[in-house]
């Protein structure tokens, strides 16, 4: 395994990516996407006057450049210190994704915010977040730990359920990006009803996309609730799963509240931007749970108290004797 400080650098990179998504959402929320009409420079300068929408758009570019630098540095560190080939390739994939994301951002500006490119830019941002979160998870010292046998006969397995949940969250974020860039955020102006009804008249594409986003929120809530109940009922002692599961439940409740506030406040900047950022946090947390559950289902078992304390373990040569069971 790579040194702990490399893992911490990966966590910083993932955190910076969340900040980048918040800043990008701020650009859209304030309508500043074309405040700087050229790319890669801004009005032919590296540092233009940071006033009005330029503050948001050029600030977004600066944060993106910083995240790109962090990602390249992380790849170099993992190439040097990480023995697992697949982790090194995942880091290279992260660099490729952040470079492509930068190009898409430039194309979005140069082509004057075309819908397809803008939505693709938003979706790739979430995919890049998943990659860096994956790097942060798999470089953690506790990655080799496995859950004790819970003897669960039910299907699906926890990792399957968690993966489905993460996939549903990602699809919901795609719908949200489509709705946002279509300008359909108020296509249905009331909440929790839709034009005073459970099902609105689906007479325009904006209404259809908006209503699908609401239905997606319901599906995501059900998936998250199922995952949370599963973990609370069978893995309560596993803090590596319990803590992110509780966080996920809280984030989903916050996300639903922000979605309602976005409509009730007629798309005010703060709730609309926070809605995007919290959605990214929901995705990141669901990916953490899915990866940890998958790893716990595949890794050798360590006898509780003999090698793993709070998710951080030592191998056979460490301060605790670890006993591995062949699975």
Image: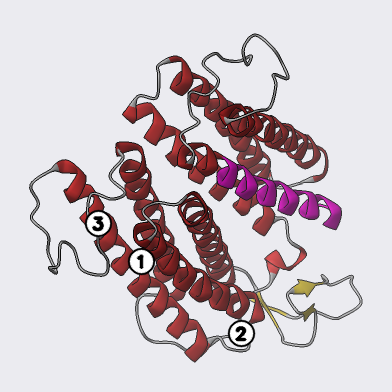
Looking at the magenta stretch, what is its main secondary structure?
helix
Number of numbered discs visible in the structure rendering: 3
- Range of magenta residues: 1-23
Residue 33 is left or right of residue 198, and the answer is: right
Crowding at mark 1 (Cα within 10 Å: few <14, some 14-19, many 20+): many
Mark 1 — residue?
A: 220
Residue situated in front as seen by the camera: 91 or 181: 181
Which numbered disc flags the more N-terminal residue, 2 or 3?
2
Instruction: Tell me: residue 285, above or below residue 147.
Output: above
Which numbered disc flags the more N-terminal residue, 1 or 3?
3
Mark 3 — residue?
A: 189
Mark 2 — residue?
A: 148
Q: Kindly identify the residue that appears in the image at 75 percent across and 40 percent down.
A: 74
Q: Kindly identify the residue that appears in the image at 48 percent across and 23 percent down.
A: 34
Q: Which of marks 2 and 3 is in front?
A: 3
Q: Please, what secondary structure does the residue beneath circle 2 have?
A: loop
The x, y position of residue 270, in whole percent, is 52, 53
Cα–Cα span, label 1 and label 3: 22 Å
The x, y position of residue 7, in whole percent, is 77, 54
């Amino acid at each position: 395994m790579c040194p702990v400080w490399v893992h911490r650098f990966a966590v910083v990179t993932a955190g910076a990516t969340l900040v980048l998504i918040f800043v990008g959402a701020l650009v859209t929320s304030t309508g500043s996407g074309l405040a700087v009409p050229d790319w890669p420079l801004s009005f032919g300068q590296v540092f233009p006057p940071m006033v009005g929408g330029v503050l948001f758009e050029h600030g977004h570019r600066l944060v993106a450049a910083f995240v790109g630098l962090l990602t390249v540095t992380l790849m170099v560190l993992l190439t040097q210190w990480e023995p697992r080939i697949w982790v090194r390739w995942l880091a290279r994939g992260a660099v490729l994704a952040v470079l492509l994301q930068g190009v898409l951002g430039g194309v979005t500006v140069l082509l004057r915010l075309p819908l397809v490119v803008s939505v693709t830019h938003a979706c790739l941002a979430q995919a890049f977040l998943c990659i860096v979160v994956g790097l942060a998870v798999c470089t953690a010292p506790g990655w080799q730990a496995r859950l004790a046998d819970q003897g669960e006969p039910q299907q699906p397995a926890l990792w399957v359920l968690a993966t489905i949940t993460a996939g549903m969250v990602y699809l919901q974020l795609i719908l949200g990006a489509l709705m946002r860039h279509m300008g359909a955020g108020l296509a249905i102006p009331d909440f929790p009803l839709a034009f005073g009804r459970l099902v609105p008249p689906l007479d325009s594409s904006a209404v259809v996309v908006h209503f699908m986003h609401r239905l997606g929120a319901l599906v995501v809530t059900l998936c998250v609730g199922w995952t949370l109940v599963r973990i609370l009922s069978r893995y309560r002692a596993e803090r590596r799963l319990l803590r992110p599961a509780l966080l996920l439940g809280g984030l989903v409740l916050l996300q639903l509240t922000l979605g309602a506030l976005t409509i009730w406040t007629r798309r005010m900047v703060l709730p609309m931007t926070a809605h995007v950022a919290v959605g990214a946090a929901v995705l990141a947390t669901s990916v953490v749970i899915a990866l940890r559950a998958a790893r716990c289902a595949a890794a050798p078992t360590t006898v509780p108290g003999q090698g793993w304390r709070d998710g951080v373990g030592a191998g056979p040569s460490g301060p605790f004797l670890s006993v591995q069971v062949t699975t």
